[in-house]
Image (tube, rainbow, N blue to C red):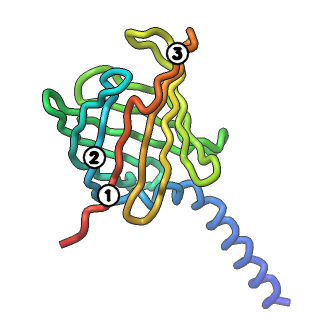
Amino acid sequence: MTYIKNYLTYCFLFIGIVTNAQPNEDFNFMLGDWEVEAKIRQNEIHYIHGSGSMNVYYNQSKDTLFADMNVKFQNFEVIGTTIRTYNDKTERWAVSWNPESGNDVPNIEGAYQGDHFVEIDYGKDWYGLYTGKLVIYNISEDRFSVRKDKIYDDGIFMKDIWVYEANRLKEE
């Protein structure tokens, strides 16, 4: 009887650990140092290209993921940190973009949809009110892709306004 009680206890403990750990493992593929090739839409057909790096890590309690990005373009840089914290109640990730200069972009919500991670934000820029959709896709151990689209309240759709490919830096 003791054996059965111990066995059941270990089973419940294992299930509890696996279930509780799962959301924090959503971004294990992203941990580490990355080389980034990016582009920002300048107009309907032209992009500005840049390159840089990204370092991704969890905080000590592993409930918040930080992605520090530094991408240099010809006349400016994109430097900042994306912060992702899992919300147990909504079963989604609360996300914010925190640039070194400029305004933070808070209140982004993210979740997996199949094998893509999708983040939705709402904002206003020089074109008006929009809904933004950032998708992390083509996820593998050594590479992933990101693209962001915006649809404006007046119906204008801007595809691929922010795009980048991240390739894992090889340890030396």
Tell me the quarter of the picture where residue 83 sits.
top left
Callout 1–callout 2 Cβ contact below 8 Å: yes
Q: Residue at x 48, y 36 (%)?
A: 134
Residue that mark 1 sits on: 167
Q: Residue at x 44, y 61 (%)?
A: 29
Residue that mark 2 sits on: 37
Q: Quadrant of the N terminus?
A: bottom right
Characterize the local packing of mark 2: few (<14), some (14-19) or many (20 or more) Cα atoms within 10 angstroms: some
Q: Nearer the viewer, residue 12 or 74?
A: 74
Q: Taking 154 as reference, is 148 left or right?
A: left
What amino acid is found at the position of numbered circle 2 in the picture?
Glu
Alpha carbon separation for disc pair 3 and 1: 32 Å
Tell me the quarter of the picture where residue 154 sits.
top right
Alpha carbon separation for disc pair 3 and 2: 27 Å
Q: Nearer the viewer, residue 148 or 119?
A: 148
Q: Quadrant of the C terminus?
A: bottom left
Q: Taking 31 as reference, is 33 left or right?
A: left
Please give the label number shown on residue 3. none
Residue that mark 3 sits on: 156
Label whose residue precedes the other's in the sequence (3 or 1): 3
Label whose residue precedes the other's in the sequence (1 or 2): 2
Q: Does residue 87 lie above or below 97 as drawn?
A: below
Give residue 17's position: percent from left, percent from top: 62, 66
Characterize the local packing of mark 1: few (<14), some (14-19) or many (20 or more) Cα atoms within 10 angstroms: some
